[in-house]
Image (tube, rainbow, N blue to C red):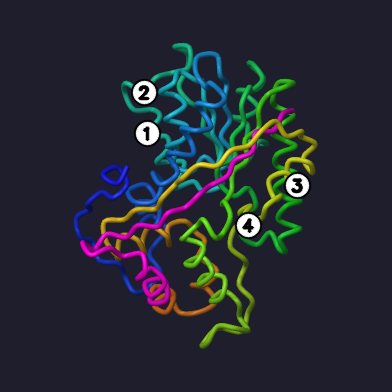
């Protein structure tokens, strides 16, 4: 596990200013995205994803989870609100040698959510059997947590309408904070994003970071609001491992969970405080290792 997650990268010092969006996307692909591979594998194994599976990935990002499903011979479709991430997903899924579900067409990818023409096109051919929401469904600026839950539930309801009766909808989020070392670092972002509590902040209130289910019953509440019924859950160890401190900071910043903090304060200050919060998890050889647990819920349409 360690050798897979802690991969050496050629030095590429981070800018003290907010990195451009393309650099952040590359950091996500090169550093951060693979941290959730154990979650993807556990879900696919539980649902027996393979030939005959028609999968819709909500917030598919740069497509690693879709690629893993395609490798199991599933027919995949993905939607995301970030065109840069979708471009990289296309590079991956349209590359020569990538399996196509049932030997059919390549993956369909589209901008947006389940309302995307590509999702509706795929569902018109045959309803989805599995929908995954491994990433936050509510975009930054959704408002309060309750407003974010409402927005996420609306997205799930739209996706459920494209899914066959009895199909699986998978929701994922952080496990208990006491079992997630990264929660200490995320609290730094939450504190700095608070315009009242952050020193040197600007006056305007920044849009909040994406809401990600982390409470004990968050996933169940989200499923209930979307009209889905729970059909089991699980927990998966997803340690975050990095080759060094700079790699760890870049990887965490690429998640978007610190964007609000950077807008509210100084990006240099954000990086400094993330680095300080990471020090307890830096090993003698310079690598950074944070044990985490993620939780998933399988709900049915």
Q: Which mark is residue 221?
A: 3
> Which segment did they paint magenta?
272-301
Say left or right for 194 vs 245.
right
Nearer to us of marks 4 and 2 is 4
Observer-side mark, 4 or 3, equals 3
Comes first in the chain, label 4 or label 3: 4
Label 2 Cα crowd, 10 Å radius (few <14 / some 14-19 / many 20+): some
SS label for mark 2: loop
261 vs 106: above or below: below
Mark 1 or mark 2: name the one nearer the start of the chain. Answer: 1
Q: Percent position (x, y) of residue 133?
A: 59, 40
Residue 72, by quadrant, is top left
Disc 4 secondary structure class: loop
Q: Which mark is residue 98?
A: 2
Say whether disc 4 or disc 2 marks the residue closer to the N-terminus. 2
Closer to the observer: label 4 or label 1? 4
- Residue 211 is labelled as 4
In the image, what residue occupies the spot 27% across and 61% down? 244
In the rendered image, residue 83, in percent from the top left (x then y), is placed at: 49, 46
- Mark seen at residue 92: 1
**The one of 36 and 198 positioned closer to us in this rendering:** 36
Residue contact at pointers 2 and 3, CB within 8 angstroms: no
Q: Is residue 62 positioned above or below 191 on the image?
A: above
Say which quadrant the C terminus sits in. Answer: top right
């Amino acid at each position: 596990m360690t050798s897979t997650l802690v991969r050496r990268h050629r030095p590429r010092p981070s800018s003290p200013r907010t990195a451009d969006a393309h650099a952040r996307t590359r950091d996500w692909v090169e550093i951060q995205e693979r941290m959730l591979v154990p979650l993807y594998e556990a879900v696919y194994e539980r649902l027996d994803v393979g030939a005959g599976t028609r999968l819709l990935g909500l917030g598919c990002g740069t497509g690693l989870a879709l690629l893993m499903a395609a490798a199991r011979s599933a027919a995949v479709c993905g939607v995301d609100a970030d065109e840069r991430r979708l471009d990289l997903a296309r590079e991956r899924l349209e590359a020569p040698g990538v399996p196509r579900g049932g030997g059919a067409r390549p993956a369909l990818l589209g901008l947006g959510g389940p309302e995307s023409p590509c999702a509706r096109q795929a569902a018109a051919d045959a309803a989805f059997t599995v929908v995954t929401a491994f990433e936050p469904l509510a975009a930054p600026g959704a408002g309060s947590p309750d407003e974010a839950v409402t927005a996420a539930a609306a997205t799930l309801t739209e996706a459920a309408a494209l899914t066959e009766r009895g199909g699986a909808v998978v929701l994922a989020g952080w496990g208990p904070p006491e079992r997630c070392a990264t929660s200490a670092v995320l609290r730094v972002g939450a504190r700095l994003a608070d315009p009242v509590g952050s020193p040197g902040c600007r006056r305007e209130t920044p849009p909040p970071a994406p809401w990600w289910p982390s409470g004990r019953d968050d996933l169940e509440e989200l499923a209930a609001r979307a009209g889905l019924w729970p059909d089991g859950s699980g927990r998966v160890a997803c340690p975050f491992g990095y080759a060094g401190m700079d790699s760890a900071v870049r990887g965490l910043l690429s998640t978007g969970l610190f964007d609000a903090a950077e807008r509210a304060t100084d990006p240099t200050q954000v990086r400094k405080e993330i680095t300080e919060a990471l020090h307890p998890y830096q090993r003698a050889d310079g690598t950074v290792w944070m044990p985490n647990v993620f939780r998933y819920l399988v709900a049915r349409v």
